[in-house]
Image (cartoon, rainbow, N blue to C red):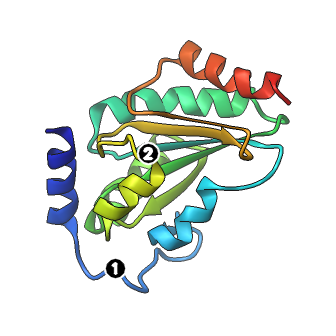
Amino acid sequence: MNRLFFIFFLLASQTMLEGQSLPENKVPFLSFGEFEPLLHRQSDTTYVLNFWATWCGPCVRELPHFEKLGKEMAGRKVKIILVSLDFEEQIQSRLLPFLKRKKIKSEVKVLSTEGQQDWIDRVDPSWSGAIPATIIYRNNTKRVFYERAFNYSELKSTVLTFLEQQ
């Protein structure tokens, strides 16, 4: 049911996406092909990729946890990337004002919904497509996928297990 709900909204927002991007100095708008390398970086950095949207209540409620973690982990080898799945036609009117109003400092990328049925499985085969969803990984040594919201202590303790293994 969640996957159908998510896919319905993604399809409803679908427009011609090829070659379009946000103006410079705004969040990057990526096709899945452009985004996919972020899922497989080989370094000693722990990557935390959170899939979210401004229209998703649980997503918005957990964003402060990612922001707090980013501040607390500054100087450590942790990279937080917030992957917005907001509708393309609402990026300028909704997403960018939201990021400014909430003073989001983490790196934000907007992922095109084109081909979402294919890329959902490529992100993680267990993903139904529901958000929030988070991938935490370091190299090929450890990768975990969560299709749920985090509270701060859960998020921090999960990320710390990656840092302890370095």
- Spatial CA distance of label 1 from label 2 is 19 Å
Q: Which residue is mark 1?
A: 17
> Is 115 placed left or right of 105 in the picture?
left
Query: Residue 18, position in %: x, y?
Result: 38, 84
Q: Residue furthest top?
A: 153
Query: Residue 43, position in %: x, y?
Result: 81, 50
Question: Can you say which quadrant of the picture contains the C terminus?
Answer: top right
Q: CB atoms at circles 1 and 2 under 8 Å apart?
A: no
Point 23% across, 77% down: residue: 15
> Is 165 placed left or right of 99 in the picture?
right
Q: Given the image, on which type of amino acid does mark 2 rest? A: Phe
Q: Is residue 34 above or below residue 144?
A: below
Query: Residue 107, position in %: x, y?
Result: 61, 51
Q: Nearer the viewer, residue 36 or 66?
A: 36
Q: Which residue is mark 2?
A: 51
Q: Given the image, on which type of amino acid does mark 1 rest? A: Leu
Does the rendering let one see residue 77? Answer: yes
> Is 116 placed left or right of 28 in the picture?
left
Q: Is residue 165 above or below residue 70?
A: above
Q: Secondary structure at mark 2?
A: strand
Does the rendering let one see residue 30? Answer: no
